[in-house]
Image (cartoon, grey):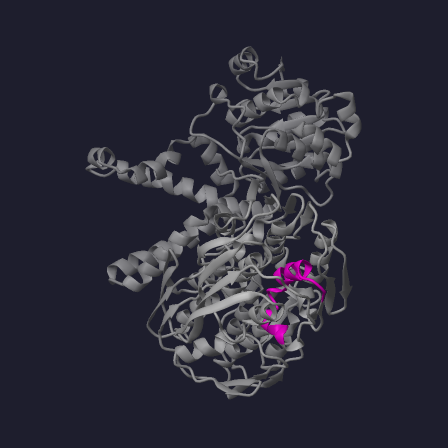
Amino acid sequence: MRLQRHLQQQGMGAEVASGEPLFRRIAIIGLGLIGGSLASAVRLNGLASEVVGADRNQEDLILAQSLGIIDTVAKSTAEAVQGADLVVLAVPVQATRQVLEEVHPCLAADATLTDVGSTKAGFVKDIHAVFGGFLPNIIPGHPIAGSEKSGIRATNPDLFRNHKVILTPPDIVDDSHLARLKLLWEACGASVLTMSVEYHDEVLAATSHLPHLIAFSLVDTLAGEDENMDIFRYAAGGFRDFTRIAASDPVMWHDIFLSNRDAVLRVIDHFTRDLDQLRTAIADQDSATLLRVFTRAKAAREHFSKMLSGQAYVTNNSERQVTFRLRPGGEVVGDIRVPGDKSISHRSIMLGALADGVTEVKGFLEGEDSLATLQAFRDMGVVIEGPDNGFVRIHGVGVQGLQAPRGPIYLGNSGTGMRLFAGLLAAQPFDSELSGDASLSVRPMNRVADPLRSMGAVIETAEGGRPPLKIRGSQSTKLTGIHYDMPVASAQVKSCLLLAGLYADGTTSVTEPAPTRDHTERMLAGFGYKVDREGPTASLTGGARLTANAIDVPADISSAAFFIVAASIAPGSDLLLRHVGMNPTRVGVINILQQMGADIQILEEREVGGEPVADLRVRHAELRGIEIPEEQVPLAIDEFPALFIAAVCATGRTVLTGAGELRVKESDRIQVMADGLATLGVTTTVTEDGIVIEGGQTIGGGTVNSHSDHRIAMSFTMAALRATGEIEIQDCANVATSFPGFVELARQTGIRIAAEDSAAGNGQE
């Protein structure tokens, strides 16, 4: 059934209807572990009418047929290829050219040709030598799967399940050939990725070839020691686990290293330099360097499954499909604390890294956005311990202490991270590049790039002022302070310019058209950096230092907002939310809900680390529609998706204006919310900068697409409390970016939620 669905999606329904397999005749040349396992998987899944095997070892061929791995034994490569519509080369990479010469005369014009080699540049070179160039039906491939065992007896039809297969198709590839080959591997249980030949070889040299080389070398070195028996006798599990790969096929790896020579040499040189630095650090008793490398490596290892792209930290949920399913009704009760404030978590890492001394942070949000910021500073030479249950220790390097990152800084879905980093990196002496996921890559960045250019920064953006941002560093010139009147109220733009102003000559000042969150100004003051505030204008003078500080991150009011709305709309609800940040520039959601008649008690008001916090008790109340005051809009800009749900449950009309900023968030939040509400039977009127919602409408059941926007997904979760039918919310993987543990906490308070997470390929080599 899975194969049939794939075929239908690719427009191959005729073959499904006829019951024909994906290929008529598959010829597999070379029946080692990979070739034999592919043959076995093809037969097990009924993907071909006939599987023909060819191999230099006739005994292996006969054994493969007797074991049911292949249907037919071919006496030669030419005989196997004759009449085949898919030919797979599964031979040692050094033997590829000779086998291609045997394949070439017999390969049908409409047959697909692929391979399974660990290096691709050599295969491409051999194709050019034998065929005179690439053809649309030739697709290099590499299954990221294997075992220390080899040969036909090690064959395993499940070898590729939950593993990745990389295809490196040429620009002229025929789409039908590529689609069929993808389907074949997917039907064998693999997840298929595509990339260029050059990138494949660079990535695999670092993630596969170098580790194998080190393992072979280490075992060989220790085996030559005088105490070699005791070394191996008393070796701990870590040594055995790491050196396990030294038991791999020596001939195969000999071929791989020679074939991928250039990429392997580059990564060996890089590793040798880094290893020499560690040797020097040990000799010099340089604890700071050791701790910096080890903490950075520990974090990288924890995210190793996300590092195939070669970036230091990758938040990539594109292969995950998370769906929320909600049963209608329920009440919200309990005593909870939502995760730490994301805005403050970002800034605590940034300013702690730039400070002199050690900054300790409690309550740090361990969501993917904040972790991306943390990892970026590790990549710029900052030692950061943790996070450990929200505790982080940052060994600041001072305002001038950042080092050039070794690659692009990937910020996942974090618009806050990208805009703040733009200001910080615009003043550094080194070049840098900021990139993000598909959602972040379509968001506007000229709103920070243009004023930074006015300060003297050199920044390139993609078409339309979108990421990635390429920032040119300068050793000789400094930024110059400017005054900037923001056309649109944005805390991210304001913070970006103030961070750039730390490095600029003179004074940098920003005037905002309406109040926005002031976490940056408050936190700079907490780190001893003077920030002046005069009406709507914040200003600072460059050139001062920051001093390490202790930070206790309050619970995020944006995350609390979903539960505040939930308790307000669900009859019988009584919920206590602890330690919620009550910054005056963030409490718009409280102000608006109270105007709508919400029962919100503010208890135990206090100040922690310069930020006001309080406990909130929220009980169900009959809400009424209002015209939302425009001065409250910037104070609640992130909370409006949840407020739209409150408006639907209120009596009377709610009118929002002056909220055009919502259209350039992770999604067009006005339109996406309106579309989702329409799916549930709720009618709204969308305007250019807002929405009109008639309250009192019935919320039905249905399927809502969140468009990868975490706040959309969580808002519709709350709608289920007043729905008449079940609600399914699609594309919810990015909820983890701002609210880790959301599903569990929602369930704890009484919301009837279940999450389905289907990862498309969690394989590892």
* Residue nearer the viewer, 693 or 559: 693
Residue 487: x and y in percent read: 67, 79
Q: How many marks?
A: 0
In the visual, does 700 lie left or right of 120?
right
Residue 516: x and y in percent read: 57, 76
Instruction: Please say if 665 is above or below 198.
Output: below
Instruction: Please say if 262 is above or below 48.
Output: below
Dividing the picture into quarters, in which one does residue 96 lie?
top right
Dividing the picture into quarters, in which one does residue 137 lie?
top right
Which residue in the rendered view is the most extreme toward the right? 14
Residue shown at the point (54%, 14%) measured from the top left: 58
Does residue 59 show up magenta in the picture?
Answer: no
Residue shown at the point (37%, 62%) measured from the top left: 384
Residue 607: x and y in percent read: 40, 74
Residue shown at the point (57%, 20%) measured from the top left: 55
Viewport quadrant of the N terminus: top right
- Can the viewer see residue 714 in this picture? yes
- Classified by dominant secondary structure, the portion drawn in magenta counts as helix
Residue 219: x and y in percent read: 32, 37
Instruction: Please say if 706 is above or below 603.
Output: above
* Residue nearer the viewer, 299 or 294: 299
Q: Which residues are magenta?
A: 632-653
- Can the viewer see residue 408 in this picture? no
In the visual, does 664 lie left or right of 200?
right
* Residue nearer the viewer, 632 or 349: 632
Does residue 648 show up magenta in the picture?
Answer: yes
